[in-house]
Structures are given as structure tokens and as C-alpha cells.
Amino acid sequence: MVDAKNPPEVDRVAASRKAIAARRGRASLKRDLGTRVVTPQDVMRRVDRDPAAATLRITEFLTALPAIGEGKRDRILAELGISPVKRLGGLGVRQRRAVATWLDRRFPEPQPRAGRSRLLVLAGPTAVGKGTVAAQIQAAHPELLLSVSATTRPPRPGEVDGTHYYFVDDASFDRMVENGELLEHATVHNKYRYGTPRMPIERALADGRSVLLEIDLQGARQVRRAEPSATLVFLLPPSWDELVQRLVGRGTEDAEERARRLRTAKVELAAQGEFDYRVVNDDVARAAADVAALVRRVN
């Protein structure tokens, strides 16, 4: 007979590992909320299928959100009539509805605008995989023009001039700006300049083709000002931890540059509400298919 008060050692080890995994899952989820990799609405939608979300206390959930401290958290719980000992998975139907209403008011999710054009802008934080996803889309949809940016940074190993980027010097970039040849341009990470040549895009759109721009946040904002009908898509990492791993694993930046890019990534993630759609890059093929579906939707 098994003693319920003294389970076998193998059961205790398994339970301990499960508890550790659960704590790590909740800690990762709170980091994702704090860095805006996920929206609080995303977390509420996954409560019934994600143990980390289900076992997260409502107090931890709220204080993980930007600009919510303990005092504000307690006022919110009192307003919603929710006990601070509750976990998200233990909220009743009425309580979930109250939380959802409060979240939509405080942290509204982006809503697609009407009248969008065939000019699709793909942006996102550093190391999220924008270039890889864009290349996958181009391979599957050769009828779509993938714009090639100009940049003053040197090529990375394997990059080809005219295919991945137009690699130019500062003087050439200055001339392109002065002549109005760029749809947008920006200095990224306080170091190198990037810009999108205007003529190939205008020619493709006039021919009835769709155009995909893979650019940074500054560039996306400029495009939206210059072409308000452009469709903006924000590419998200599956988690903050995964984004850090991708940047470190890439090995193309030194420690100082990685730290600078991660600081920038936090700022970029906070801007996702400016975009029409959000796509999570947890699988390159699936993310590319999701973005391509948006291209077809506006054709």
C-alpha cells in the first residue's frame, strides 16, 4: 500500500520538478507582460489551456502590467470586486468579463483600419526574425515585391549587395535623402542608417503588385505618415526569453551592442499598438503564412 503522507522518492522528485517548471512558466509570463511581448488580453484568452496563465495570481498579473504598482493594483481589485488570493484560472465568468472590460479600456488592442493598400509594412523588435520571415514570404509568393533597403552598415557574413541590402557609404546615402529617393530613412541603434528606395515600390504598386517592406519601427512610422493607407504588421517573438536567446545566439554583436539592442527592443515592443495586425514568430513558416494571408486580404 502506498503511504499518501510519504509518497515514493520518485513521486516527490517529479512533483518538485513540476513545481519548478510552473514557477518558471509564471515568471516567464510576467516578463512577457512587462515587456509587452504579450498583451494582457492574450494571457486571459489562454487561461483555459496554459497552466502558467491559469495559476498566475491576479495580483501578480496586474503588477506585471506597465505602470501598475501595488497601490493601484489594490484599487483595481476593489473596483472589480475580486479577491487578491484569486488565480486567473479560478476567476468566475462575471469576474473574467469585468477584467476583460477593464483591460480593453486601459490597454486597448490594435484594430485594423479600413481602406488599407497593397503596401504591407513588416516591423518588429531587433532579432525577431523579420528578414527570415520576409524571405520565406518572397519564396512562396514571387509575385510580391520584397523591397530591398539601403544601409550604411557593413554586410554580415552571407549577405549579398542588391539582394539583402544595398550597401552604401554615408555620402551616397546623403545624396539619396537629398534627392527624395527614399520613402523612409532612419538611424537605427544610434549607429547605422537604413532607408527604403521609393521608385521600385511606386512602380510595383502602379503595376498592381503587392509590396512588402521589412523595416524597423522608425521607418514604419515614416511610411505611415507618407502613405497612410499602408498596412502595418508587427512581428512578435514567442517570448522575451526567446528574443534574448535569438540575439545572443546570432553572435553578430558584441556585449555592448546586444545590451543596446535589448533596450531598444523594449521600446519597440511598447509600440505594437500602433500597428494594424500582430503576428507571433514562433514558427517561421507559420508566421510567413499568416503575413501572406494579410497580403491576400487587402488585394
Image (cartoon, rainbow, N blue to C red):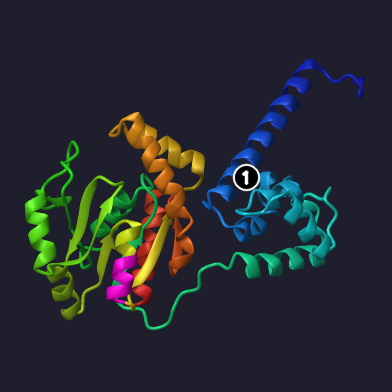
Horizontal side of 46 relative to 245 (left or right) equals: right
Does residue 282 appear anywhere in the picture? no
Up-down relation of residue 264 to residue 121 (above or below): above
Q: Quadrant of the N terminus?
A: top right
Q: Main secondary structure of the magenta part?
A: helix
Residue name at image x 25 percent, y 72 percent = 210
Look at mark 1 in the image and give the residue it sits on.
30
Residue name at image x 29 percent, y 54 percent = 136
Where does residue 12 sit, x and y in percent of width and height? 78, 21
> Magenta includes 91?
no
Direction bottom: furthest residue: 115
Query: Residues in magenta?
Result: 221-227
Please identify the quarter of the rendering in which residue 134 is found.
Answer: bottom left
Horizontal side of 240 relative to 45 (left or right) equals: left
Where does residue 33 sit, x and y in percent of width and height? 59, 50
**Mark 1 packing: few (<14 Cα in 10 Å), some, or many (20+)?**
many
Secondary structure of the residue carrying tag 1 is helix
What's the residue type where badge 1 is placed? Lys
Horizontal side of 38 relative to 292 (left or right) equals: right
Where does residue 277 sit, x and y in percent of width and height? 45, 66
